[in-house]
């Protein structure tokens, strides 16, 4: 797979969901076209922008200007940055603010931010007046290639992540790749784990292309757009055939069963970003697949090497404070995995690999071999 050397036109990826189909528009500076694209889709609409403090500082004025240029009146709702905003309390604040802003059934909510804002604002839109339309303007790499696409919205319960939510598809996604220039390198790398995931789970040629081009993606330019567009196309295809995750959509959870347990063990804190947990989880899933004889060990090594080259953590031992809090204990990790949504009657669901580019859903995995595998990983060197 070769990337286009250069292109200035936005790439448009269609999410083919019948009368709820929508475009993902990817490119540098596409944010400036937000107003005209919305005006074309929903003439006469009013909009409320939901964002967080840090994104507001960088991108709110530009977003408002893009809307004003197209004659769209907008109001702004600013929430605190971070996972803590995916809460009942913030949902209530956002919902009440939307009602005060007189966002009516035919109006629009715009989620301007990363995954937290997208999930929160999308869910508020899903329940406001029994559902109003919303537009995703993802401002992190992770949100551009994953959470803004596919309609999963929601908040966390004190009992677990994403336990309260709805499927509510956006009507448009605007992924401006220039917005990623203000991300910290660590945040960008964490998003890159989800990009690599698409290669590992379903596209060996894309994985090889990433091995050759990952440095250019970090620099920006055509390689970055190509990587985001390829990731979005992969996700759009899966969502179009399994919107509600009754089958193939679960493939997108590659690396997440292990990854979520690690995020839980570190308290969903800055010690381990979601994408970093996914990177370690992908490596563990590949190594576990190799231990079952499903893939060659050399493929697991290749996956690990690529993620490490991109600067991501790839081993449990790379997590800050690894030796504390039971992270180094297989039984603790098993207990954390048992709390995950992917567990049914004591059996685990894993996404395993038959090859680089060919993932499979393994339901009813017995915990004992997983525990043994983790115990060996923890006892051995990385
Ligand atoms: N992030 C996984 C999904 O959207 O299904």
Image: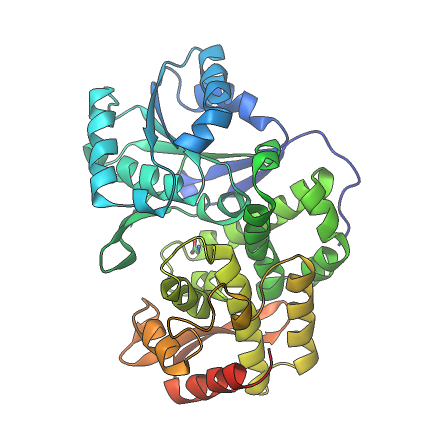
Residue 57 is situated, as x and y percent measured from the top left of the image, at 46, 26
**Is 124 situated left or right of 231 in this image?**
left
Work out which residue is located at the far right of the displayed protein and give it. 5
Q: Quadrant of the C terminus?
A: bottom right
Residue 335 is situated, as x and y percent measured from the top left of the image, at 32, 77
Using the rendered view, name the quadrant where residue 169 is placed.
top left
Residue 135 is situated, as x and y percent measured from the top left of the image, at 41, 32
Q: Quadrant of the N terminus?
A: bottom right
Which residue does the image show at 45% across and 43% down from the upper left?
Answer: 148
Please tell me whether residue 174 is drawn above or below residue 244 in the rendered image.
above
**Is 52 situated left or right of 2 in this image?**
left
Which residue does the image show at 44% across and 60% down from the upper left?
Answer: 249
Q: How is the image coloured?
A: rainbow
Which residue does the image show at 63% across and 49% down from the upper left?
Answer: 230
Whether residue 113 is visible, yes or no, is: yes
Foreground pick, 260 / 164? 260
Foreground pick, 47 / 282? 282
Using the rendered view, name the quadrant where residue 11 is placed.
top right
Question: Which quarter of the rendered image does ligand 1 occupy?
Answer: bottom left
**Is 291 situated left or right of 336 in this image?**
right
Residue 224 is situated, as x and y percent measured from the top left of the image, at 67, 43
Whether residue 366 is visible, yes or no, is: no
Please tell me whether residue 338 is drawn above or below residue 21 in the rendered image.
below
Number of labels in the image equals 0
Foreground pick, 310 / 105? 310
């Amino acid at each position: 797979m070769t990337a286009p050397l250069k292109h200035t036109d936005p790439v448009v990826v269609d999410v083919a969901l019948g009368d709820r189909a929508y475009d993902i528009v990817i490119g540098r500076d596409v944010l400036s076209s937000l107003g005209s694209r919305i005006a074309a889709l929903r003439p006469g609409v009013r909009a409320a922008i939901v964002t967080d403090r840090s994104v507001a500082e960088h991108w709110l004025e530009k977003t408002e200007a893009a809307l004003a240029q197209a004659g769209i009146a907008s109001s702004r709702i600013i929430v605190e940055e971070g996972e803590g905003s995916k809460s009942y309390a913030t949902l209530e604040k956002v919902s009440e603010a939307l009602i005060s802003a007189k966002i009516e059934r035919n109006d629009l909510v715009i989620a301007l931010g990363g995954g937290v804002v997208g999930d929160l604002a999308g869910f508020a839109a899903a329940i406001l007046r029994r559902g109003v339309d919303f537009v995703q303007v993802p401002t992190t790499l992770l949100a551009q290639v994953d959470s803004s696409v596919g309609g999963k919205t929601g908040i966390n319960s004190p009992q677990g992540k994403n336990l309260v939510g709805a499927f509510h598809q956006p009507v448009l996604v605007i992924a401006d790749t220039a917005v990623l220039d203000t991300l910290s390198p660590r945040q960008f790398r964490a998003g890159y784990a989800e990009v690599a995931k698409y290669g590992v789970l379903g596209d060996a040629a894309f994985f090889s292309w990433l091995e050759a081009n990952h440095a250019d993606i970090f620099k920006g330019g055509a390689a970055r757009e190509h990587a985001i567009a390829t990731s979005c196309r992969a996700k759009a295809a899966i969502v179009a055939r399994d919107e509600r995750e009754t089958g193939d959509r679960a493939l997108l959870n590659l690396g997440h069963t292990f990854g979520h347990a690690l995020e839980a063990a570190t308290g969903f804190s800055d010690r381990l970003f979601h994408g970093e947990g996914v990177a370690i989880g992908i490596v563990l899933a590949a190594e576990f697949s190799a231990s079952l004889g499903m893939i060659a060990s050399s493929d697991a090594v290749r996956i690990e090497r690529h993620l490490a080259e991109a600067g991501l953590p790839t081993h449990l031992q790379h997590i800050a404070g690894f030796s504390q809090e039971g992270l180094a204990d297989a039984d603790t990790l098993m207990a954390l995995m048992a709390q995950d949504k992917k567990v049914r009657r004591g059996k685990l669901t894993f996404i395993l690999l038959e090859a680089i580019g060919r993932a499979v859903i393994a339901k009813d995995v017995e915990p004992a071999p997983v525990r043994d595998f983790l115990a060996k990983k923890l006892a051995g060197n990385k």
